[in-house]
Amino acid sequence: MPTVKVEDIKIKDERFREEFGEIEELAVSISRYGLLHPIVIDEDMNLVAGERRLKAHQKLGLESIDVKYIKDTSELEKREIEIEENLRRKDFTWTEEVKAKNAVDTIKRELYGNAVKGHGGGWSMRDTADSLGDSMGTVSRDLRLAKAIEEFPELMKEKTKEAAWKNYQKIRERSLVDALSSKVVVKVDVKCLVHGDSKVEMKKLKSNSVDLVHTDPPFAIALDKGFKSIDAWAGKVYDDELQEVMNTIGLVVKECYRVLKEDRHMYLYFAIQHYDYVRKLLEDTGFNVNAVPCMWHKTGGGGAGGSEYSFASNYEVCFLCMKGRRALNKLGQSNVWVEPRVAPQRKIHPTQKPHSLIRKCIEQSTRAGELVIDPFAGSASTLLAAFETKREAWGCELDKEYYGQGVLRIEALKKSQGE
């Protein structure tokens, strides 16, 4: 077996292997038993296969290494040898494995041409599977996954090939749904906003008919301290007892659970001081509640309620609740939503949310054409955001003034769309 000096071997930058595993373990094995398989080099001393073995020799301080020469071999064929040898060793990471299989398939087709069904000759996926000792199904899936990680690099974060494949299937499903959503047509109709008590009106909705609830119940700040909360901007006084307010919300939450389809979401805003009460209420109803609430960080303008003894409040919180389980449409999004508050001169309702914020929730939790409702509709911001994102909408508002303003806003949207 010929040997060469370790220092004379050249390693090109474009090597397929990215991770080398436990070189120390291989070095110990070589020091005990010697090199069982020689490395492969070309006539110019360029390494073709066996980089881990070479690195182990370097670690041991060995001056020479057994080699096998290949001559009169093209760069494409050298690449083929490198990849095939490592594939048979089965010590690639899953990303390296699928990339390598894809490279083998590509190289073979370049060397031998593509097989044409019914005409014979050329290289086929069946040939790739046979050469690797894998099934057609496994090779087909791995080749698709190799192309998928080029288009969606985030798949490489998955720990296993199986997890990456499942995630890829979800991405494909979302892409298909998004493509179909462009064909969805939703008719804007003022009848979607009802003037009445949500405890009564919600009972008229069919069970398992709603895809998303997005609502901000009328929590009166500081009622649990025996105070009245006066909204100076709107000139309205909320003087109900806290328990009465909570009872109303509890009844509506039960109706929300009833009307929601399985595996659907609800976003419910609440006063942070009522965290324990509201969370228990939701969980007792049957919702799965994310214990860490989402937070709307309000930008633009000063906060509310600041004094020399306290900081001004610049955020609101809401629970993401689920009836069953449904994945969010965009994974990895922050639970802190940085969105500008509605300017005072544009406000219709004292707790009015910006459309950009509501759209964020709707687009995360529904598909085009699905039904979004708000049992405490206020000035119909949720309904408008639903229409703007091609969702169906329904809402209920008890206050006559806000109901009237909501109708006007829906009519304005309808006219702007030429309906």
Image (spheres, rainbow, N blue to C red):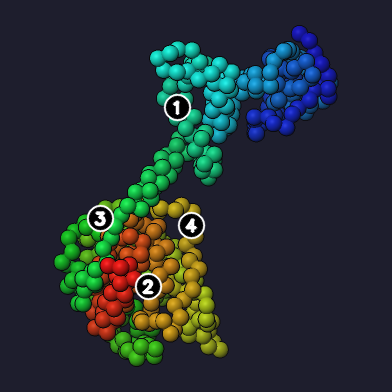
Q: Is 381 situated above or below 348?
A: above
Q: Position of residue 190 (x, y in %)?
A: 24, 72
Which residue is tagged 1? 140
CA distance for labels 4 and 2: 21 Å
Q: Quadrant of the C terminus?
A: bottom left
Q: Residue flagged by tag 3: what amino acid is it?
A: Lys
Q: Earlier in the sequence, mark 3 or mark 4?
A: 3
Q: Secondary structure at mark 2?
A: strand
On residue 270, the disc is 2
CA distance for labels 1 and 4: 32 Å
Is mark 1 in CB contact (under 8 Å) with mark 2?
no
**Mark 3: few, some, or many residues within 10 Å (few <14, many ≥20)?**
some
Q: Quadrant of the N terminus?
A: top right
Is mark 3 in CB contact (under 8 Å) with mark 1?
no
Kindly report which numbered mark, 4 or 2, lies closer to the viewer in this rendering: 4
Is mark 3 in CB contact (under 8 Å) with mark 4?
no
CA distance for labels 1 and 2: 50 Å
Which residue is tagged 4? 333
Residue at the top extreme of this rendering: 1
Task: Residue at 30% x, 54% y: name it.
Answer: 184
